[in-house]
C-alpha cells in the first residue's frame, strides 16, 4: 500500500499543469513532428483603442527564451491563437497585412517578394467564432496552418515562415502580447 501511495504522489508532482488565461487552458508541453516543445509564453491580443480582447496566444519553443532572435530563428515552433471573440475573415486578413507591413517598414521590396506566400496564407482565413483556433506550426518544411481544425496546404517558404513569426515580435501592434509571448 505504501508503494502505491508513493507512486501516486510522485505522479501527482511530476504531472505538467496547464497554463491558463481567461479560463482557457493550454498545455505546458506540445509535440510537433516528434519534437517536444515547451510553453514559452501566453498572452492576450488586444485591439483598438478600447483594448478589445481578440485572442489568447500560446507560443511553444524547444526551450524557453526571452531573446527575440532565439524565438524567430529556431525550428520547430508552434503558435496557437484561441479566439475569445468573433472575427471576420476580412478583419483577419487586414490584421495579417498590417502585421507584415510593420515587420517590413522601409523594406517594401522584401515585402513584395513575399506577397505570393502572404496571399496564399490570407486565402486560408475564414470567419472565426469565439472558441475557435488558428494553429501555426513552423518547421523545416515550412508553415503548416490549421484553421478551425482544418489543415491547409503547407507553405514551403522559409522567408515567409520567419516573416510570419516576426509579426508578433518586430514592430508589433500589441507590445504587451509580444512581452507575454517572450515569457516576460
Image (spheres, grey):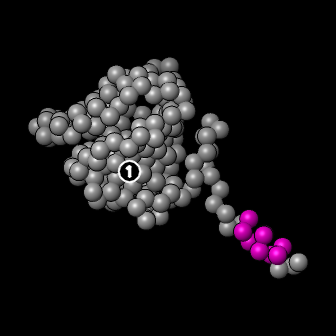
In magenta stretch: residue 143: no
Magenta highlight range: 4-12
Tell me if 152 is positioned left or right of 119 in this view: right
Question: Could you say which quadrant of the image residue 145 lies in?
Answer: top left
The residue located at (23%, 50%) in the rendering is 156
Task: Identify which residue is drawn at 34% across, 42% down.
Answer: 152
Residue 88 in sight from this viewpoint: yes
Coordinates of residue 94 in the picture (x, y in percent): 31, 25
Residue that sits furthest to the right in the current view: 1
Q: Secondary structure at mark 1?
A: strand
Q: Is residue 136 left or right of residue 156?
A: right
Residue most toward the left?
109
Q: Residue at x 61, y 49 (%)?
A: 19
Q: Report whether residue 169 is seen.
A: no
Q: Which part of the image, by quadrant, shows the N terminus?
A: bottom right
Q: Position of residue 139 (x, y in %)?
A: 33, 57
The quadrant holding residue 147 is top left
Q: Residues within 10 Å of mark 1 (few under 14, many from 20)?
A: many
**Extreme residue in the bottom direction:** 3
Toward which corner of the image does residue 16 lie, by quadrant?
bottom right
Residue 86 screen position, x and y as percent: 49, 24
Q: Which residue is mark 1?
A: 137
152 left or right, relative to 16: left
Q: Residue at x 40, y 61 (%)?
A: 33
- The overriding secondary structure of the stretch rendered in magenta is helix
Amino acid at each position: 500500500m505504501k508503494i502505491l501511495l508513493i507512486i501516486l504522489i510522485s505522479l501527482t508532482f511530476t504531472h505538467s499543469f496547464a497554463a491558463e488565461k481567461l479560463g482557457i487552458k493550454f498545455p505546458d508541453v506540445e509535440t510537433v513532428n516528434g519534437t517536444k516543445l515547451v510553453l514559452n509564453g501566453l498572452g492576450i491580443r488586444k485591439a483598438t483603442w478600447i483594448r478589445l480582447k481578440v485572442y489568447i496566444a500560446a507560443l511553444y519553443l524547444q526551450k524557453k527564451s526571452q531573446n527575440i532572435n532565439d524565438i524567430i530563428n529556431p525550428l520547430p515552433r508552434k503558435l496557437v491563437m484561441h479566439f475569445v471573440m468573433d472575427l471576420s475573415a476580412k478583419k483577419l486578413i487586414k490584421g495579417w497585412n498590417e502585421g507584415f507591413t510593420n515587420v517590413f517598414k522601409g523594406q517594401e521590396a522584401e515585402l513584395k517578394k513575399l506577397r505570393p506566400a502572404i496571399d496564399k496564407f490570407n486565402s486560408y482565413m475564414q470567419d472565426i467564432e469565439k472558441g475557435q483556433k488558428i494553429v501555426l506550426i513552423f518547421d523545416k518544411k515550412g508553415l503548416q496552418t490549421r484553421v478551425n481544425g482544418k489543415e491547409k496546404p503547407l507553405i514551403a517558404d522559409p522567408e515567409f515562415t520567419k516573416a510570419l513569426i516576426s509579426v508578433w515580435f518586430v514592430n508589433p501592434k500589441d507590445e504587451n502580447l509580444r512581452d507575454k509571448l517572450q515569457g516576460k
